[in-house]
Amino acid sequence: MLNRIDTLKEVCKLISETFDLSIFFVKPTGEITFEITDNRVLNPLYQNEKQNLFSILNFEPDKPFQVPVIRKTYFYENYILFSVVHEEMIEGTLIIGPSLPYVLFEQKINGLINDFHVFAQREQVSHYYSSMPVISIDKLLKISVMAFYLINQTLISTEQVTKENVNFGEQGNQDKSKLLPNTKREQPQAFHHDPLLEKKLLTIIREGRLEELKTFTQMGEESTGVLSKSSYIRSKKNVSIAGITLATRASIEGGLHPEIAFSLSDIYIQRLEDLKTIKDIDHVTGEAFFILTEKVNQVKEERFSKTITTCKNYIYNNRYERITHDDVANQVSLSHSYLSILFKKEVGISVSDYIQQVKIDEAKNLIEYTETPLSEIGSLLNFSDQSYFTKVFKKHTGITPKQYKEKFHLLQE
C-alpha cells in the first residue's frame, strides 16, 4: 500500500503526463521532496535551479496558497502554485509548469538572448521555447482547478481562481492561442495591443476611476508588438513610453491641466530610461497610470462639494442596481427637494437624469468592450423593460442601442 507521499507523487505523475508539465513538491522548509520532469529541457537562462526558480516566481515556501495562484516569469513562462493540505495541515506547495500562454516568435526569443548575453546558447534557448507546451490562460485556469481537486479533494470554480489572479482575469476572455499556429513553428507576425483593452484603460484614467484601475488587467505580453528586435527590455520600455503618452492625453481630456500632465509624463519616461529590469519597468509604468488617474480624480472632486461627490460616487458604484432620487438623498441625509436644488446647481442636471446618464455610459461601455447581447444590457442595468432602455438610450445619445453598436463596429473596421 502506498504511503501519503507516494500517493501524492503518483497523482502528480498523472497530471504531468496528461498536460506535459513538470511538477515540483516543495516542503515549507524549502526542500524539494520530489520533482517530475521526465527529462524535459531546462531553461538555459536560469537552468531551473531551485533558488533561481523560487526567486523569479516570488515564491516563499512557508507561505500558504488557499487557492491556485498563477505566476508569470519575465521569461514568458506560466506556473501554477498551490498548497497541499492533509487533515487541515499544510504539507507543502506544488509548483506546476512551466508553460507558454502563446507561441513565442523569434524576435522575442532573440530579445531575451541579447538582454541576458547568452549568445553561445542561442540554439538551446530556441529549443527550450519550441519544446514547451502552449496552454492558453483559460485552459491553465481549468488545469489548476482540476489539479487542486485531485490533490486536496476540494472543488473550487475557475471564477474563484480568477479572482485571486487579477492579472490573468481578462486575458482569459480571449484565447489568443487560437490566433497562432499550434503544430508548426511558423513565424507569426508581431501581435499588437488589444484596442478594446487600451480604450477601457484610457477611459478609466480619463474618468479618474482609481478603484477600477487597481483591478484592471494590464495588457499581457501576447497582446503587445515588438518595438525593438534587439532587446526585450528596450521593447518593454518603448511599449511603456507609448502607454504613458496615451495615458497623459487621456488625463488631459479628463480635466488635468496639460502642464501638470506633461510634467508627470516627462518624469516617468525619464525614469524608465534608467531602468534595467522588466519588473522595475512594469512597476514604474503602473505607477504612472495610477498617479495620472489619481490627479484626474482630484480635479473632478474639487469641482463639486463633498456632498455631491458622495452622491455621484454612490450612483456610479450602484449603476447596475435600481437607484432612485430618494436612495441618493438618503446616502447624504438630505431631503428629496433640497438635494434636487443642490445637485442641479452643481452638476447642471437633475439627479434622475444623472442616474440615467451614468447607466447609459455604462451601456455604451458594455457595447464597446464586451459581447453582451443588446437584449441583456438593459436588464443588467435594471431598466424596467427593453423599450424603456431603448428610449432612454436614444434620449442621451440620439440613436438606439442597435444603431450605436452598428456605428461602433463600423468605426472599428
Image: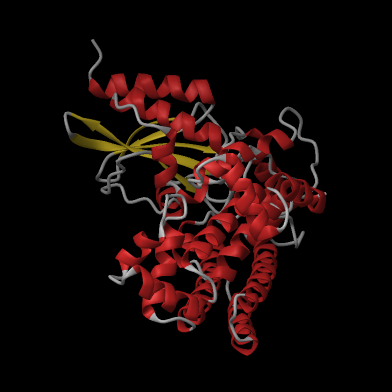
Q: Which residue is painted at 72% across and 47% down in the image? A: 405
In this figure, which colouring scheme has been used for the structure? secondary structure
Judge by depth and name the residue closer to the eye, 161 or 61.
Answer: 161
Judge by depth and name the residue closer to the eye, 9 or 384.
Answer: 384
| Residue 12 placement: quadrant | top left
The quarter of the image holding the N terminus is top left
Where does residue 155 sit, x and y in percent of width and height? 33, 27
- The vertical placement of 245 against 10, above or below, is below
Judge by depth and name the residue closer to the eye, 356 or 246.
Answer: 356
Q: Which residue is painted at 64% across and 47% down in the image? A: 390
Q: Could one spot residue 405 in this view of the protein?
A: yes
Where does residue 20 sit, x and y in percent of width and height? 54, 26
Where does residue 110 sit, x and y in percent of width and height? 72, 53
- The vertical placement of 302 against 43, above or below, is below
Q: Residue pushed farthest front? A: 337
- The vertical placement of 23 against 313, above or below, is above
